[in-house]
Amino acid sequence: MRTLNHMRLEFDARPENESFARIAAAAFAVPFNPTMDVLSDIRTAVSEAVTNAIVHAYRERGGVITLSAALLENGVLRLEISDQGCGIPDIPQAMQPFFTTQPEKERSGMGFSVMQSFMDDVQVESEVGKGTTVRMEKRVFEAEVKN
Amino acid sequence: MLSHVRKKDVLLVRLTGELDQCSASGIRRDLDQMLLDPRVRHLVIDLKDMPFMDSSGLGVILGRYRMMQERGGTVSLMHLSPQVKRVYDLSGMARIIPVVEEKEAAE
């Protein structure tokens, strides 16, 4: 599948960058005329993935997060959020609604559920001690059907 | 960022801006400060000026619900944007923390 456009950002795992990351991801999609709902979905899902990296992967001690985005010619936006944090020992468990390792901090445990609900596809790859990559896809426009 | 008004035992708080993990701690602290007032039995959170919330916001709301529950009180929300409503509906929290109309909140 041909890539129409691509970008890659690297930023510190700081809470103030949650807003930056979700706005950047949505702004990347804007030239392809997505609906407001699609932009809102992208912002929400990116916010969740970046928050996970900050509070779980790096345990609020800082690190580097990479956000890359590619717009494919079939109209799909592919997003990747990566960290080099502690990793997730049990991915299916982490993706269960309401599962959290930090209930005392009032975490809702809904991060992955929101990502899955707001995006068309969510895949998580993780290795304990090495880091996590969240890959998400969202259709942002309907590609023309070629006869 | 928030403003508030108390009428008898009802505290109406209007949140502004975006509610994510970054802003959650400040909002939590400010709400808890207001809830120190023992006269408050019912907390109504107005989200009219808060168009964006992620799951960090759910944690803040649920935490305040537990506090109010301990004193026999309630929490309700109003004026959810479409984005906030989607996140909120997904959580299923509306069963315990209802979304109310302005008229209901005033009663």
Image: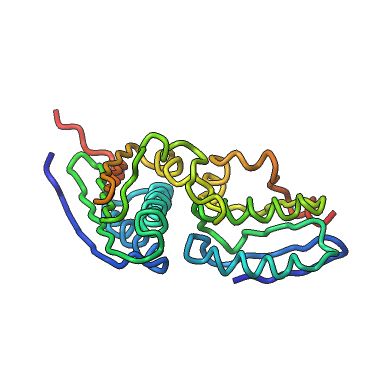
Residue A144 sits above or below residue B88 on the image: above
Q: Which quadrant of the figure contains the C terminus of chain B?
A: bottom right
Identified at 46% across, 36% down, the residue is A96
Q: Quadrant of residue B10?
A: bottom right
Count of numbered circles in the view? 0
Identified at 25% across, 58% down, the residue is A66
Q: Position of residue A53 (x, y in %)?
A: 35, 55
Q: Quadrant of residue A138?
A: top left
Identified at 42% across, 66% down, the residue is A15
Q: Position of residue A79 (x, y in %)?
A: 27, 49
Direction from residue B98 to residue B57 in the image, left or right = left
Q: Position of residue B58 (x, y in %)?
A: 57, 51
User: Is B30 or A73 nearer to us in this picture?
Assistant: B30
- Which residue, as the protein is rendered here, is positioned at the far left? A2
- Which residue, as the protein is rendered here, is positioned at the far right? B8
Direction from residue A13 to residue A84 in the image, left or right = left
- Render colour scheme: rainbow
Identified at 55% across, 50% down, the residue is A103
Q: Which quadrant of the figure contains the N terminus of chain B?
A: bottom right
- Which residue, as the protein is rendered here, is positioned at the far top? A147
User: Is B64 or B78 nearer to us in this picture?
Assistant: B64
Q: Position of residue A84 (x, y in %)?
A: 26, 56
Direction from residue A41 to residue B41 in the image, left or right = right
